[in-house]
Image (cartoon, rainbow, N blue to C red):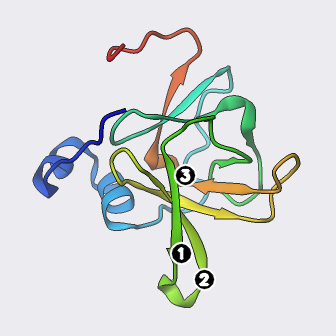
Amino acid sequence: MDKITKSDAEWRAQLSDLAYKVTRKHGTERAFTHEDFPKGPGVYTCTCCGAPLFGQDTKYDSGSGWPSFYAPLEGAPIGTQEDRRLFMRRTEVHCTRCDAHLGHVFPDGPAPTGLRYCINGVALGFKPEGETDPEA
């Protein structure tokens, strides 16, 4: 996938205020605000660039209030880096295609990975299985 680069003004025009705050300014949405994702098979995508990130089959209810996954899709443009904001030491998760902040990953998830990708719901879109990709 090609790298996506846009100006701050272009991101502001494309995204809702909350999506902009979370994905471009490293914000966090309130917990339990995205319980409305479809339950059927499909793929969670980056709300900024549409890159496929997580499969429905790796989503689980962590009780944290944010969509949680135990692994990204194979080959997904997921990157991590240390985050020391808010006087904590965490691992930030971002989309390497467009540099969107997605959330954080923690070592307290279920098998088989033991990881919990705790992702802001506003940073995700959902593409149901079988839906064609307009970029394909």
Tally of marks: 3
- Helix, strand or loop at label 3? It is loop
On the rendered structure, is 87 left or right of 65?
left
Q: Label 1, on which residue?
A: 82
Q: Position of residue 57 (x, y in %)?
A: 74, 30
Looking at the picture, does residue 133 appear above or below residue 6? above
Task: Tell whether label 1 touches label 3 (CB within 8 Å).
Answer: no
Mark number, residue 89: 2
Percent position of residue 77, x then y: 48, 43
Residue drawn at the location 27% of the way across and 55% of the way down? 17
Toward the viewer: 131 or 18?
Answer: 131
Type of amino acid under label 3 = Thr
The residue that label 3 is drawn on is 33
Numbered circle sitting on residue 108: none
Residue 80 percent coordinates (x, y): 53, 61
In-front residue for pair 25/16: 25
Instruction: Point out the frontmost of discs 3 and 2.
Output: 2
Q: Amino acid type of disc 2?
A: Arg
Query: Three-letter amino acid code at disc 1?
Result: Glu
> Horizontal placement of 106 versus 29: left or right?
right
Residue 115 vs residue 123, the one in the foreground? 115
Q: Residue at x 81, y 50 (%)?
A: 113
- Mark 3 and mark 1: Cα distance apart in space: 26 Å
Residue at point 68%, 26% (across, down):
39
Pick out the residue farthest to the right.
111
Location of residue 32 by image quarter: bottom right
Which of pointers 3 and 2 lies earlier in the amino acid sequence?
A: 3
Secondary structure category for the residue under label 1? strand
Which class describes the residues within 10 Å of circle 1: few (<14), some (14-19), or many (20+)? few
x 71%, y 60%: residue:
64
Q: Are marks 3 and 2 in contact (CB under 8 Å)?
A: no
